[in-house]
């Protein structure tokens, strides 16, 4: 197994509600995660974490802006002291503290959307601050406004719930009074003012509902310590003291929902700084899994359905309108009684994944947000490693010596494609093939890297193809990391690895700081790093792989029509664009690292960047080409700005310092002091070479289109 994913969980409360039960059940069902928890209050939830051996920290949090700010600062310090791979904020309340703290601390963050609380501008803010969102219902995926939202539903039960009479007997044992012919309305929620429990009590006082009684399953909430007393007083005032019962939540309460004749999920939109309702999704989904009718105030595409054969009722009522809830209960009784729907599982619910599958989906969402797809997994599928050479004899020996020990699964192979070398490259590769049958050598006339790669892909035997280049030194676990990423429950068809740039000499060291991404930054990006790389690039991204470290499926290669053979460079970027355009998915595996040696001279480095720019021009990718054009404009405008006066010079200097800030910060962090004075020079060499290449590439593209 690859290393477990280190996760810090932040919860909005210390009690065990529906959202917390969802989380605990998924954590129990996976061994991929090494978890610690941060809670705002001590309580039953901390006991649950302790019972599971999960370290937990209690940080008391008030409702004032000052208290929230103090907690955020504490969390920033906590995350910086021992950065996890990813932070998981369980609910919108937790995310409003955790997301800013994670962003400022340089930690990737995912938040869980359980309900429609704060739909609107808050969702846009969280989408900007977080790296992923987990939604517990299909409607919540869209409502989250997050481009990386993932559906992890409440799991379908892997066993039948107890028969209604057994579940009722269990509820009676916990203090719920149930007569033989009485109908049970059950609500599972914290007793806070926004939970809608008072609406359920008031509804039961309506005429014609004397057979119905209410059981409120849930603990008192620290946010509303007097709420239960208020609800008891309300029941007494309405003459319902003998028809309303309160009992604390049990960890297996979801299985006892089969005792109910209807389940009420009635949260209201929170007002001001008042307590926020617990998300209704887990409760409603669990009730539907047992075929129990659901009455809810939460809009959902599945709501207001007409009951069909074997399908439970789902009725939406307006919040804070007890009369509408009473009408829904009348409706259930008038159609033959809720018992007709009991025990029938609707087809939509039956399609939901079980607990292990949901836990796997959560772990995958966290791993991909952390840029560590496959973390905590052991891949078992055979992989074909493909590498191409042209006149690089010594590199063949060095690379194959490193790759062969990584072939640990039956069926693994290395396919070496010689692109018409005129030195001893083919002879060296053939010698390796003679010693080890897992190495195969293909030869072809010299035709360039894209065509050579296509030759290799056509010859491989496995569905997953990993690539690295001459001049690269794969880490000992490089292939294992890519193999593990493909073992995800919903594997990506394009896996982008990472590379470290080696440097020999001051100018090469400066170019490494200026021109290439840094693996540590992709896993723990600071605030300025996020902003800088979004503006200027130079960050690892799943959609922009490098042939130095990548893997893809044969199916993706076929959908993309292979590597574009008319390109001399940037064929890997063009390939990724075509794979994504075909509807395939990409994931970043920052732990799949190789070391890569730069070109030995500044002149050869400039030629390399010229070719990169040429490839960008031929691709005409808006994002990449746009950056090249902006750089060209900046370099052309700089002399004019210097001549226009102090104000223009100050503006130009500020822009230059901003542009050079990240490479300089990298140099300072790594104590590469001698490289700092050289950074402006190598930046100019890189940018001007790349811009010139982009202009040439655009010219070639226009010529090709005319022909």
Image (cartoon, grey):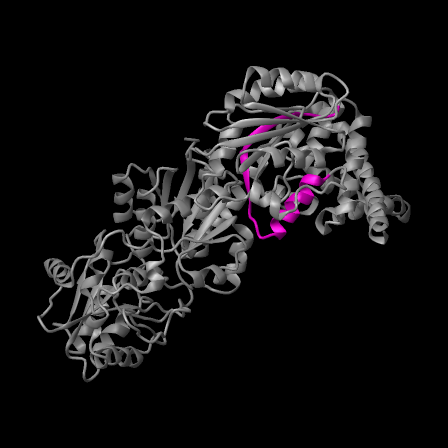
Q: How many marks?
A: 0
Residue 655: where, in percent of width, then height?
76, 45
Side of 509 relative to 363 (left or right) = right
User: Eyeballing the image, is 45 above or below 605?
Assistant: below
Residue at 52% across, 60% down: 145
Query: Is residue 280 visible in the rendered structure shown here?
Result: no
Q: Nearer the viewer, residue 629 or 672?
A: 629
Residue 206: where, in percent of width, then height?
22, 82
User: Eyeballing the image, is 531 above or below 322?
Assistant: above
Q: Quadrant of the N terminus?
A: top left
Side of 132 relative to 290 (left or right) = right
The answer to if 587 sits in the magenta stretch is yes
Residue 156: where, in percent of width, then height?
31, 55
Residue at 46% across, 56% down: 65
Residue 669: where, in percent of width, then height?
62, 29
Q: Nearer the viewer, residue 4 or 374?
A: 374
Query: Is residue 176 visible in the rendered structure shown here?
Result: yes
The answer to if 415 sits in the magenta stretch is no
Q: Quadrant of residue 574?
A: top right
**From which residue to which does the magenta span run?**
570-599
């Amino acid at each position: 197994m690859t290393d477990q994913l280190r996760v810090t969980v932040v919860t909005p409360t210390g009690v065990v509600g529906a959202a917390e039960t969802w989380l605990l059940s998924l954590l129990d069902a996976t061994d991929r995660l090494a978890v610690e928890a941060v809670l705002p209050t001590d309580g039953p939830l901390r006991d649950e974490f302790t019972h599971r051996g999960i370290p937990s920290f209690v940080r008391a949090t008030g409702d004032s802006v000052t208290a929230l700010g103090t907690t955020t600062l504490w969390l920033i310090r906590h995350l910086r002291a021992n950065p996890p791979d990813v932070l998981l904020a369980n609910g919108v309340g937790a995310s409003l503290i955790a997301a800013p703290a994670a962003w400022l601390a340089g930690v990737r963050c995912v938040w869980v959307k359980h309900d429609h609380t704060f739909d609107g501008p808050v969702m846009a803010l969280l989408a900007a601050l977080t790296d992923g969102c987990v939604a517990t219902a299909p409607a919540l995926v869209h409502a989250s406004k997050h481009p990386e939202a993932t559906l992890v539903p409440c799991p379908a039960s892997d066993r039948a719930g107890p028969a209604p009479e057994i579940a009722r007997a269990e509820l009676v044992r916990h203090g719920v009074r149930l007569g033989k012919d009485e109908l049970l309305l059950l609500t599972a929620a914290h007793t806070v003012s926004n939970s809608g429990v008072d609406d359920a009590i008031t509804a039961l006082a309506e005429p014609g509902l004397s057979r119905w009684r209410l059981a409120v399953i849930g603990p008192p909430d620290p946010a509303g310590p007097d709420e239960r007393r208020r609800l008891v007083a309300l029941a007494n005032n309405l003459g319902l003291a003998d028809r309303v019962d309160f009992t604390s939540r049990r960890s297996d309460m979801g299985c006892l929902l089969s005792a109910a004749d209807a389940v009420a999920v009635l949260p209201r939109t929170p007002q001001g700084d008042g307590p926020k309702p617990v998300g209704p999704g887990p409760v409603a989904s669990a009730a539907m899994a047992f075929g129990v009718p659901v009455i809810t105030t939460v809009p959902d595409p599945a709501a207001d359905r007409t009951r069909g054969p074997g399908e439970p009722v789902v009725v939406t009522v307006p919040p804070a309108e007890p009369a509408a809830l009473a009408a829904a209960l009348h409706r259930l009784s008038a159609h033959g009684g809720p018992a007709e729907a009991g025990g029938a599982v609707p087809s939509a619910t039956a399609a939901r994944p079980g607990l292990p599958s949901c836990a796997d989906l959560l772990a995958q969402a966290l791993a991909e947000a952390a840029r560590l797809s496959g973390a905590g997994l052991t891949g078992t599928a055979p992989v074909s490693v493909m590498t191409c050479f042209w006149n690089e004899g010594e590199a063949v020996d060095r690379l194959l010596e490193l790759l062969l020990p990584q072939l640990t699964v039956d069926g693994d192979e290395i396919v070496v494609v010689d692109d018409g070398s005129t030195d001893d490259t083919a002879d060296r590769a053939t010698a390796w093939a003679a010693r080890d049958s897992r190495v195969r050598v293909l030869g072809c006339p010299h035709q360039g890297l894209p065509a050579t790669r296509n030759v290799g892909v056509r010859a491989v035997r496995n569905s997953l193809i990993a690539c690295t280049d001459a001049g690269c030194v794969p880490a000992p676990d490089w292939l294992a990391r890519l193999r593990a990423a493909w073992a995800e429950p919903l594997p990506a068809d394009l896996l982008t690895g990472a590379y470290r740039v080696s440097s020999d000499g001051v100018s090469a060291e400066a170019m490494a700081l200026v021109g290439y991404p840094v693996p540590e930054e992709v896993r723990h990006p600071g605030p300025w790093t996020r902003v800088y790389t979004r503006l200027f690039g130079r960050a690892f991204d799943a959609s922009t792989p490098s042939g130095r470290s990548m893997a893809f499926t044969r199916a993706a290669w076929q959908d993309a029509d292979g590597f574009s053979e008319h390109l001399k460079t940037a064929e890997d970027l063009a390939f990724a664009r075509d794979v994504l355009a075909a509807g395939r998915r990409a994931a970043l595996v920052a732990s799949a690292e190789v070391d890569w040696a730069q070109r030995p001279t500044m002149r050869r480095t400039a030629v390399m960047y010229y070719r990169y720019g040429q490839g960008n021009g031929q691709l005409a990718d808006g994002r990449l080409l746009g950056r090249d054009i902006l750089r060209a404009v900046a370099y052309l405008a700089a002399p004019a700005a210097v001549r226009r006066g102090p104000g223009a010079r100050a503006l130009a200097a500020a822009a230059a310092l901003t542009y050079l800030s990240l490479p300089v910060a990298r140099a300072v962090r790594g104590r590469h002091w001698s490289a700092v004075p050289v950074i402006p020079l190598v930046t100019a060499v890189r940018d001007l070479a790349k811009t010139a290449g982009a202009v040439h590439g655009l010219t070639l593209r226009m010529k090709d289109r005319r022909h």
